[in-house]
Image: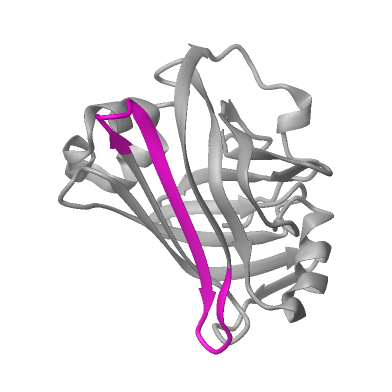
Amino acid sequence: MTSIFRQALGADFDRLHPRLRRRFSVGLDSGESCTGRGVMDRVWHGGPWLRPFLALGGTRNILLPRTGRDIPFTIENVPFTDTFGRETVTFVRTFAFPDGPRRFDATMVHSPERGCVVDYLGTHQHLATDLHLSVDREGALVIRSGEHRFREGPVDARVPALIGGDAVVRESYDEASARFRIRVRVTNRRFGPLFGYEGSFTAEYAPARGIRQDLRPVREEVRA
């Protein structure tokens, strides 16, 4: 079984920088987990009107209701099999803000039906987002979000683009500093920039021997 990212990228996976190929080979087949530790040079969000929405999202580890500079952080990528038998990889990011840590949780699966990686956001996987992956000329991984869907009990609704966020993520490897670099920017087509962050980190690998309970979602969603 190849990693969910190799499945999504196909032959383009081999165009990634070798360090990125290893990072995004994390999965059940590789038997490895990856922990990144570093510093976010900047965590930002848009105007004051966003604060109530960011605070609400923060209660389910979906959005970051804080801003800052030089914020230490970790990202934990652990593969596991979810309740529905799907290979899943965690993307749990913990930001050590001065007033206390904040988390931004996601779990990702590859969906053959949708032909992409599906990103479930938050502790309860209420939001599912299609992720479209590509590799740029420098061997960096570029991720662009597609359709967003909200799921809660019988509710299964597409989030209109007018109120949704368009995310662009670029992860690269800097040979000079021997660090991974990450840049995330989320915008709305009408209201402009919503939030984002950028920084760098180093990565360590370990055998994947199960998943800690605090990394696993409280609720898992079967609908992609």
Quadrant where the image shows the C terminus: bottom right
Task: Write down the quadrant of residue 114 in the picture.
Answer: bottom left
Q: The magenta stretch spans which residues? A: 173-194
Q: Nearer the viewer, residue 169 or 30?
A: 169
Q: Would you place residue 151 above or below residue 9 in this image?
A: below
Q: Identify the residue at the far front of this view.
A: 69
Q: Position of residue 148 (x, y in %)?
A: 57, 69
Judged by its main secondary structure, the magenta piece is strand
Q: Residue at x 59, y 34 (%)?
A: 85
Q: Residue at x 63, y 83 (%)?
A: 163
Magenta-colored stretch includes residue 178: yes
Left or right of 190 on screen, residue 47: right
Left or right of 92 on screen, residue 155: right
Magenta-colored stretch includes residue 184: yes
Q: Nearer the viewer, residue 193 or 84?
A: 193
Q: Nearer the viewer, residue 189 or 217?
A: 189
Task: Write down the quadrant of residue 44 in the picture.
Answer: bottom right
Q: Position of residue 180 (x, y in %)?
A: 38, 34
Image coloring type: one colour
Q: Nearer the viewer, residue 183 or 121?
A: 183
Q: Residue at x 78, y 71 (%)?
A: 51
Residue 154 visible? The answer is: yes
